[in-house]
Image (cartoon, coloured by chain):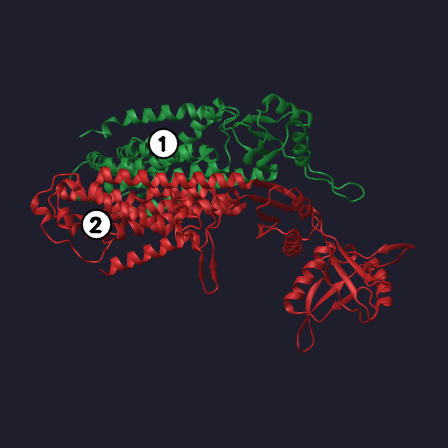
Chain colours: A red, B green
Amino acid sequence: MKRLIFVVILTLAAAYVVWPQQPGNYIPGGDSLPGSQGIHIGNFNRQGAKLGLDLQGGSQLTLQADMSQVPTDQRDNALKGVLNVIERRVNAYGVAEPQIQTRGNDRVIVQLPGLRDPEEAKKLIGQTAKLEFKEQGPDGQFVPASGTLNGQQIALTGAYLVPGRQQVTFQGRAGLPEVAFEFNSDGAQVFQQITSRLVGKPLGIFLDGERISAPTVQAVLSSNGVITGLGLEEARLLALQLNAGALPVPVTIEEERTVDATLGADSVHKSIAAGEIALLVVIAFMLLYYRLPGLAASGALIVYSLIALSIFKLIPVTLTLAGIAGFILSVGMAVDANILIFERMKEELRSGKTVAAAIRAGEDRAWPSIRDSNTSTLITCGVLYFFGQQFGATIIMGFALVLAIGVLVSLFSAIVVTRLFLELLLSQPWAHNSRLFGMEIAPSQIGGAVSRRPAAAGTRG
Amino acid sequence: MFDFVRNRRLFYLLSAMLILPGVISLVLPGGLNPGIDFTSGTIMTIQFNRPEAVDQTELRDSFGQLGHAEAIVQRSGENTFVVRTRPLQQAATNESGELGTSERQQIEQALTERFGPLQILNLDQVSPLIAAEIVRYAILAVAAASLFILLYLWWAFSKVTHPVRYGATAVAALIHDALVVLGIFSILGRIFPAEIQLESTFIVAVLTVIGFSVHDTIVVFDRIRENFIRRSGDTFEDVVNHSLAQTLTRSLNTSLTVLLTLVVLMLFGGVTIRTFVLALLVGITTGTYSSIFVASMLLVSWNLGELRWLWPWGSRATAAARA
């Protein structure tokens, strides 16, 4: 009884989580049903399932940073600098929920959901970072700060900083964080001229035209200086940004995948239809071939679908077209364990065991093959996931994750849930009919009460 | 009871006939018809909004005029076309530091002028650098999956004599399945060069097939393992024969449910994943065949010392098994 309550509560909770915002898209005539408001528990908020760019529309760009000019020991920081520069540009462009991650030693993956034409964004992203120093003009506006060098008027830019020498240091006993910077000899000359006229005034530091800091000049400086009065995180970021400006890393777009939202929506509709039809087809097969045990397996398959989908939504797993195909495939695989158990059960029944004993023996004896076969699928999933991760193929990672979760959930549904349903069915007198098992069973075999002992799979494991 | 074991040479012949044409096609130049994931390039789907049909030749001309004589234009719907070109250029900065238009924008503009409003439904572009890397990782992934499965099976069957044989024959069966899929797609790629182009999802399909192939093989092997202990008086051939007869229904049924879902995906899942689903359909069908007619038969052959010619350097293990 405890197991029944547990499974019922779990199923209801999963159904609640899975329930769509627009039921009409999933159930014929479901428009009149109330839609889900999403799940909100404390800080946890989840509106709908997370869709990949191929389903919701948008652009994924793989950027390659050219590190050939960067000393080996500075490459990690240089890549972080590139990431920061791109993040700020994408955010300035105003895309909802962009995702920007580094991949490997020299790549950045940018995901821009909902973007129809990424050309403008690509122009912005593809530019090399530009760090400028500015001073306030008479009207309070920042204008490029310049000085004379070898008789020429030049503006001070990040190109005059010594690459990699901008770093966070800690000042005095209190250990207050500050950012030390260093100009090369040309830069030092210009910087001296600028600071000598800016004492007590702010020096604006601009990255890509955006002000990232405006410290007040305390004294006349030349090659070395520090910026004080910063929080630790702030200081780290500023050092990163100054270095990015000191040694701009050119980026090129190596890969682009753009999907229009209308195509994505079409794919979603087709996938939903295919998934629902597949579920019905598998249920029909199980009922026709395995009769009463097939009914229990079908119930378990519905529980499986609800639990798996709710896990995808809660984690959340980014659902892509290949991922949904993987889930639909897993519906067909989820009954595999049932088939192994039922076939074994039939053998045990033929050998004269009672129904209850046959169920138990079927599970116990089928377990090693269920365990080994599912492990091999999990191994493949692991390899696929790693493979996808290596070059940011989110589609492949999504497929592997969906299949792996499917395999794990199906072990629970096919063994624990099916057994529970089968016991419930067998507690009804009408179920003790040999035709419902699709084979001849002697009356003596079905007389006994069904065992209530807890499922103990793996006794032979 | 059908004598599987006695007919094993027939099954080997059948497998050879299944694999050989594909392998020949694979080895000949242009073995697989790779898509842009493996060769680099651009593939886009363009949908025109005007009511009258856009002429395919006219569209190809337009691409030729835009400097893309290499473009392959293919109709995929009423007014929808799939176009493959070499990688498009990004917008470049001119002397005054301003950005020009990108090649994609130029194409969009030129086509709109000629054919009216259009939408680019999707656009994938892969550079040669990334393409080369995908190929390398794909090969590594298949090798790694095979190795891990071999090791796992070796361990899982450690209680029987010669556990390595179970792992090795299961891996042989999965290589068989991978070859069948690769071979059939190599031939298909030659017959339908525009439709069957292999992208990285094909690797996913091949790896899934590998996983499933072993899944099926294990069901049979597990029964052999069990019967081996129970029927210790029987010959190895009898044990295998019995095991196959006992597990035939479940082998077929577990594959059938998966094949049913794949057929549904094929019919209702949309064009985008059709090649992917087709690869799975082929692979899972041959996976079922190979677990019965390749893996188990090889196990018998190995046990009878028939595989000794493969390992001429020393065959103590096989000789001992016969004794």
- Residue A195 horizontal/vertical position (percent): 84, 66
Q: Position of residue A283 (x, y in %)?
A: 29, 41
**Quarter in which the N terminus of chain B is drawn:** top left
Whether residue B58 is visible here, answered yes or no, is yes
As displayed, is residue B70 above or below residue A137? above
Quadrant position of residue A231:
bottom right
What residue is shown with label 2? A422
The residue furthest left is: A444
Q: Which residue: 43% across, 52% down? A: A313
- Depth check, mark 2 against mark 1: the one in front is 2
Are labels 2 and 1 assigned to the same chain? no
Q: CA distance from mark 2 to mark 1?
A: 50 Å
Q: Secondary structure at mark 2?
A: helix
- Chain hosting mark 2: A
Q: Quadrant of the C terminus of chain B?
A: top left
Name which quarter of the figure residue B204 lies in: top left
The answer to whether residue A23 is above or below residue A210 is above
Question: Can residue B158 be spotted in the picture?
Answer: no
Q: Is residue B121 left or right of residue B244?
A: right
Identity, as a three-letter code, of the amino acid under mark 2: Leu
Q: Residues within 10 Å of mark 1 (few under 14, many from 20)?
A: few
At which x and y percent is residue A280? 32, 40
- Left/right of residue B279 with respect to residue A60 in the rendered view: left
The answer to whether A303 is drawn above or below residue B281 in the figure is: below
B206 left or right, relative to A301: right
Residue position marked by numbered label 1 in the rendering: B310
Residue that sits furthest to the right in the current view:
A151
Q: Secondary structure at mark 1?
A: helix
Classify mark 2: residues with Cα within 10 Å, few (<14), some (14-19) or many (20+). Answer: many
Looking at this view, is B30 or A3 the one in front? Answer: A3
